[in-house]
Image (cartoon, rainbow, N blue to C red):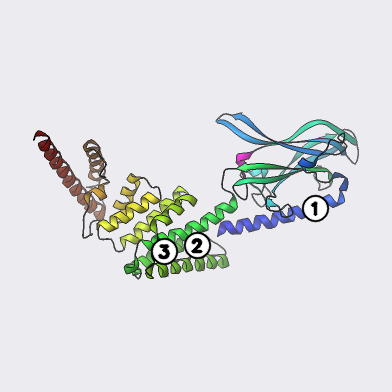
Amino acid sequence: MAGVLLIIIIVIMWVGLGLTAKKRQAQNDHNSSINRTQQKDDGHKRLTCQVDLLRQATESGQEDIFSIRIRGQINAPEAGHETDAQVILSDITENESFAQPVLCTVQKWQMEDSPAFYHRDYYGKLMQRLSMLSYWTAVLELPCNTLTLPRRGTRRLKFTVSLLSRGTENEIASASTIITYKSSRPGYIDITENARVTETLTIQLATAALGPENIENESAGAVLEDWIAGKIESIDDEQARKHVLNRLADTAQDAAILCKSGQGLDTLAICEKLASVSSIADRYAAMELFLQMLACHYNGSPEHNLAATQAAQGLQIEHDKLRAMVQKTLPIMEAEHRDSNFLLGITDDMLSGDIRKKLSSEYKKWNSRVNHPDAKVRAKADFMLELIADARSNCTTEKIAAAGSEDQ
């Protein structure tokens, strides 16, 4: 929610900046904006702007840059006039009359109170009152990877270059151009929307871990309440915090009603959607919450273990990472059933050599904890070492049986 408020603030400030620019434009009709696709060479009798997408070499490889240049006539108040160059960048994809800000990660190219792109720097002294730039003159080279657009995909970007009297807001000349640019990175609106979708899907997945028969589990309810509390604790504004709390609580209630109704929640579909819109960190956080909810009624049954495995697969979580999360989160020592292969990360497609390596790695991990100062850690280490011994014994027995079959 904090991200949503930031975007609102940025847009409000951006609108204010746009209104100022429009006022300047009305006062300087002879320097009105020019759409690059409509520009005509009129002997450089007016200032024009051009933006090219270039690729340049860097120490780490190559990067795309916007090369912003101007040429044409500049009418200064007097000879020797000192000037600043200002560059404003906006996204007009949806509507040219409703420009959206473009954010920048570099502080020197940001507005004073927001991360919206804004550039102003000393341009130089105009030696004559009437100056003519006969050739394209560089104003700024802007790396594309420093910018965040509103959305991913093909966008229409408007660049406006203004020459201002040094240290003032008095505009001497201005020109604009519009280019088309395709961004492969998520935009800030995409990120905000994806964050909300991620929260909704995470709650649905957590609820799916319970099933209809455990939807009223009080321990699980407390786990989900703690998760929601963690989501809002960083929101300073009381009204915004209350809004997010109500939204997440309503999402949890809707998920519980759907699960309890018998219609169920499609765990695989939820996980696949999460994998498509969420970051790696968010997917692991969703898996952690799923396991915490599952832990509230976990009995070690094949059904419970399969649910955890399928959720991890849908979220594209590595098998070894799942094993570590299971060992940490699920109450494996108290469970009614015990599946050594699941708890140790042994799968059916592993060869005997791979199984031995896996067991050796697990042994080193847990043997190092048998003298841990925490009694709970020591108890779990003893439990895991017992599992490893059983798994080794089973592996040896199966190997002997296989050898006997070959002899026959």
Residue found at the far left of this picture = 408
Q: Residue at x 29, y 63 (%)?
A: 297
- Figure quadrant of residue 106: top right
Question: Dot 3: what SS?
Answer: helix
Label 3 Cα neighbours within 10 Å, binned few <14 / some 14-19 / many ≥20: few
Residue tagged 1: 22
Q: Amino acid at mark 3?
A: Asp
Q: Amino acid at mark 2?
A: Ile
Residue tagged 2: 232
Say if the magenta span includes residue 220: no
Tell me if residue 375 can be seen.
yes
Residue tagged 3: 226
Quadrant (top left/top right/bottom left/bottom right) for the N terminus: bottom right
Task: Magenta stretch: give its range.
Answer: 142-147
Q: Nearer the viewer, residue 25 or 254?
A: 254
Pointers 3 and 2 in contact (CB under 8 A)? no
224 relative position to 102: left or right: left
Question: Dot 2: what SS?
Answer: helix
Q: Position of residue 82 (x, y in %)?
A: 83, 38
Q: Amino acid at mark 1?
A: Lys
